[in-house]
Structure formats: C-alpha cells, structure tokens
Image (cartoon, helix red, strand yellow):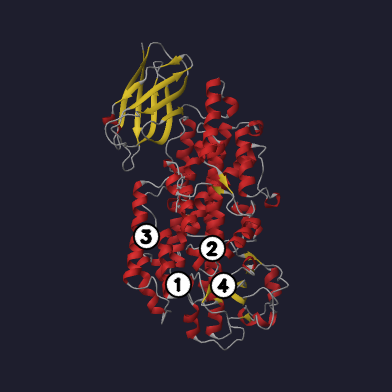
Amino acid sequence: MAEYALTVTTGNMLHAGTFDNVYVTLLGEEGQSNRTKLTGVSLVNEKVGMFSVTSAFTLGFLLLLQVEKDPLHEFEDKAWFCSTVSVRTPEDDDVFFPCYKWLFRGDLVLLRGGRATKAFEDFYPRLEDQRKKELVQQKLTYKWDEYAEGMAYVLSIKDVSSLPPEAHFSFSKALEFEYRIKFATDELTETGILHTTARWENFEDMKNVSWFTKSSLAETVSQLWKNDDFFAYQFLNGVNPYVIRRCSKLPSNFPVTDEMVKPFMADGTTLTEEMENGNIFILDYKIMEDLPTTVMDGKQVPLSAPICLLYMTPEKKLLPLAIQLGQQPSKDNPIFLPSDSEVDWLLAKLHVRHVDTLYCLLVTHLQNTHLVAEVFAMATLRNLPTIHPLYKLLIPHHRSTLFVNTVARAVLYGPGRFFDNSSISAEGQLPLLRRALAQLTYVSLCPPDDIAARGLESIPNFYHRDDALRVWNVINGFVKAVVAYYYPLDIEVAADSELQQWVNEIFNYGFLGNAASGFPSSVQNVKELIKFVTMLIFTTSARHTAVNGAQLDFLSWIPNGPLLLHLAPPTIKGTATMDDILMTLPNKSFGSITTALNWFLGEKYDDFVPLGQYPQLFSEPAVLRMIEDFQEELSTIGGAIEKRNEELQLPYLYLNPKEIENSATI
Ligand code: FE2
C-alpha cells in the first residue's frame, strides 16, 4: 500500500469554502490512486486541510491530479475556491499543484503539478494530450470578437455574468464597487445635481462636489490650476505624461515667431537657439482633428486639436509659451500667448486641458492600457496552458482585466454610455480609437525607447520618467532571470510553438498585423522574449497605475479635467470675459458625474494587489527566490522614491511599487 499525503488550501477570500463533498484521484505513470473523499469541514475559509490518499502500488511520476466536486448533495450548491494542493509522495518528493479555480457541483478539473514545462518538454502522451485539450477548451471559453473595424479585438462575452467565475471581481471588490455606485448616485440625486442642466455660478460651487475627492493633492490642484507652471508641470508628472516631446523644429502649421515669444524667454536668447539647446517642448493633439462631437441644444459642442509650445527656463521651470487651438493657422485661429488677457490665456489653457483629459481617458487609459491588457490576457488564456512557465509568470498580471473591460463596454463607451455625454460622442470615439491604435508603437510601450524617441532623456524634474525607468529596470531584471531559467537557449524560444502562437495572436488581434507598429509577430531569441514580457508586465501594472491612480488627484477639480466644454474658444482676442469661462465649463450635472467617475476609478480598492505579489504558481526553488529578489528590489526603489518625494513640493506618487497594482483591475 502506498500513501500520499495531501495538503489542500482553500482561498482566503469571502465565501471560498464549502461543505460539499470533494474527491481527488492521483494519476501517475504507473496507474492511479483510489478516488478519495475530502471531508467538507476542512474546506472552509482560510483552512488548510491535510488528507491521505492511498494506492495499492506506487504511482511513479505524478502526471495529474483529478479534483471533482460531488454532483449530488442534499443542500444548495456552495462553490469552493481551491487554491493549491501539495502532495508528499511515498518517495518523500513534494509535488505542488496550483489550482486557483472555483469548483461548482459536478465540476471536474485535471491539475498539472511540478516544474513548469514547455510543450516540447512533455514526454508522456497523457500530458501532451491534456495540454492540447486544455487549450481547446480555453479557446472555446475565451473567443475573440471584432469590436469594430480598425480596433483591437476583445473578448466575445458581453454580459459579465457569463464570464468564468475566476474572471470575476472578488466578493469584497464586487461589494465595494456596488457601494460606490450607490453612494455616488444617492448623493447626486439628493443634491439634485444628477439631472440638472444648470451651469456653475462660481468656482466655489464646484468645491461642493469635493466630497468625492479624499485627496490632498486634488485640493492642491484646485488652488494651482490657473498657474502656468502647474499647467506645464502636469505634462511631465500629471495624469498623462505621454504627449510631450522635445521640439527641434516648429511644425509648418504652427507659425510661432521669435518676436511673439521673446518676452517670455531668458534675456538674449531666441526660440531658434533654445530649440537647438533642447529647451523647447511641444504637445500636438492632431489626433483630435475633425472628430464628430456631441450635439447639445441642437449644436455640436467644440473640440479643439491644439498645439502647445513649452519652454524650460534656465531656472529649470517648464512654462507654456504659445497655444494654437486648431491645426490650421488662420486669423480665426490665433496663437494665444501668456501676455494675452488673463481670460483669453486661461481659456486657451482650458481647451488644452479639455483635449488632454479626453485623450488621457480614451487613448492613454482605455486604448493603451485596458484594451492592450485585454489582448495580452486573451492571448495568454488561449495559447499558454497552465503548466507553461509564461502562463505562471503572467496570469497574475491579467487578474480582473477581462471583467472590468466587459463592464467598461457596458457602461462607459459606445452609444448611450458615459462618454457619449462627453465632447466626443460614440460616433467620434471610434475614429479616435482607430487612429490611436494605428499610431500605437512597440517603442511607445517600452519606456527607455519611448523617452529617447520623445527626446526627454535630460529634461529636468521629470519624475514620471525617473520612476518609470526604475520600475522598468527592476521588472526587466526579474523577467531576465525567469526567462533565462526556462529558456537557456535561443532555439528553445523559436521552438516553443505555444509561445509563438501567443505572440502571433497579440500581433494580429491586438495590433491588427500592423508591421509598422513595430510589435513583433514572433520572437526568435531570449533577448527579444525578455523585452516583450517586460513590456507586457510594465504595461499591465505600472503604466496602467500611472494613469488610473493619478486621475483622482489631477482630474477631480473640474476646470483641470473637463470632459466637455460648452463654448468654442475665442477667435478674436480681448472679447471673452470671466463669465465665459464658467459658461464654457461642463454643466453641474456632467461635471459632478465626471468627478464621481474619477473617485470611482482612482481610489484604491480593498483587494488591491501590489506589483510583484503573486499567488504561488511556481514550485521551483530557484524561481521562488527570483520572486523574493524582485520584491526586495521593488521595495528598495520604493524607498528611494519616497525619499525623493519628501523633498518635492508636489510628490510624484504613482510609480512607487507599493502603489502599482499587478494588473488593470479598474
Ligand atoms: Fe483603469
């Protein structure tokens, strides 16, 4: 008689336990064990159960662990979240089987245990067969759907209740999510704001919606929003630090002259000289040009496509020099300057903030993190079996992404959804997202390359860059260690058919086979694979947090983050009044709802998992040590970031590793 000792862990989330009958069977190269019942009392929350499974003979190498939930039981079905099973064999070997699945009555799962393997390393026909069957099933569960022509493909499931249970929010997050919706809706209803079309009478009124904003930085933003240096600062360290680039030559459609900007520059210098010296920067929102806008009161609301010039002074302060709100220069499209009337200059900056906020939410946040992250998650789930080393490495970085994106499609964008009330109607969102995808490059998602491409290597006070590079380097070091462990030779990368199919699906479904994007359609060596995986982890964690986390602070003050403006910018200087600014800003209802959305998305949820904290999926001691080293290095750079922040008037908080969430979950 051979005896196998099992240690079974149940998830530590709410309602993870069960009293139902669960049976396990060990399948080895020499045969299988007795089908053994695990007593339900040991499978309740946060419990570790110890069980014994016997066999008439030793099973040899353990291939699979079969876990079944009894189809028959007298009480109502109570799902069980099985986290892991460890098996001590009669030969005193430990074999670790990660599960992390909800099991319902009648479910049967076959778990792979032991070392992570690539397809060509599975020598047992049973394992080869199981590997193929698992992927066939995954491809049936997670099917691609073309959301719209020219956009990235998405998960075909439209109703979140149809998603597999592992893809759902945790019970605690679901409760918190529902609570926030109810709290915001009740408050907006009770104050009569929800359905009013009234406009703001003064700026003080806007502070009455600040109950959403539990952030001291948001309060600071409400004080600084009119300042030129704060306006410019945000393009480096605000919610959208991805548009600014160095300007060495003015675009032909932006005829700023030396004379225009001379009064705002250091004595004795010229625009041409400062461009040569690398002190001139530009924001160009051409992507917004001619998008269909929302119709309100029978008229289309305005949407600019601004170009803004910025200057780094000798005192290392970035300041705006000139703003042109349309792409085509004309007398009706003046170049606004800091010497214009306070109202004209403020209106010009307000229109830039408006466009930057829309760009930030729809392109930077939605397209370049959530939709990209969905493609990565889909490709992983469809092409990498659970025993594949890259599945184990990446699956924590896909947590909740499919769920939150499915919710976003149902409530945020598309006809009749939230963004339909912004300046960019559903009709305008599609061309914007198409343009954004067509312009998205591999370079832009890899911070060292992106910073170089935008000429921002040496611009001072760019804390986002400094922290992004730190985080990238630490992720890269970790990925390098893990990938080198599983792929000691380039030929193993090229020969891994599952890996190649994974990369190929990302290229074809995420980037529509666009070779000009620079995204690879295959990876041929270890170096290419390390970079690709680093990009994926950085995008789903750090890049998403940088935008998601900063929304609450930077966009909650309505004039600093308007998603809708009612009045077009002045075409003749000197005619606008301060009242025009209030009439330009989003009405009370939409402005307040937008603030609520920022709170809803930006405030951390209780089941937040920071970068580098993983459920145990690997069992190889060398890899577990790599994870510990990764966590230690993240903690070290977190300490350095906190020390730097102590010396800053405005700390940059969003890429401190303990604030970075492992995946795009909200
Ligand atoms: Fe997000």
Horizontally, residue 649 falls left or right of residue 529, namely left
* Label 2: which secondary element: helix
Horizontally, residue 385 falls left or right of residue 182, namely right
Circles 4 and 2 in contact, beta carbons < 8 Å? no
Q: Mark 2 points at which residue?
A: 360
State yes or no: Cβ of the residue under disc 1 lies below 8 Å from any atom of ligand 1.
no
Give how far apart the Cα atoms at labels 2 and 1 are.
Answer: 15 Å
Q: Mark 1 points at which residue?
A: 558
Give how far apart the Cα atoms at labels 1 and 4 are.
Answer: 14 Å
Choose the circle earlier in sequence order: 3 or 2: 3
Viewer-side label of 4, 3: 3
Q: In this view, does 616 lie above or below 167?
A: above
Tag on residue 352? 4
Horizontally, residue 249 falls left or right of residue 362, namely right
Q: How crowded is mark 1: few (under 14 residues within 10 Å), some or many (20 or more)?
A: many
Which picture quadrant has residue 245?
A: bottom right
Give residue 223's position: percent from left, percent from top. Answer: 43, 75
Residue found farthest to the right: 252
Residue 461 visible, this orientation:
no
Q: Name the residue under label 3.
A: 181
Give how far apart the Cα atoms at labels 4 and 3 are.
Answer: 30 Å
Give how far apart the Cα atoms at labels 3 and 2 are.
Answer: 23 Å
Q: In this view, does 323 lie above or below 456?
A: below
- Of the 4 image quadrants, the one containing the N terminus is top left
Q: Residues within 10 Å of mark 2 (few under 14, many from 20)?
A: many
Q: In this view, does 65 lie above or below 589?
A: above
Choose the circle earlier in sequence order: 1 or 4: 4
Circles 3 and 2 in contact, beta carbons < 8 Å? no
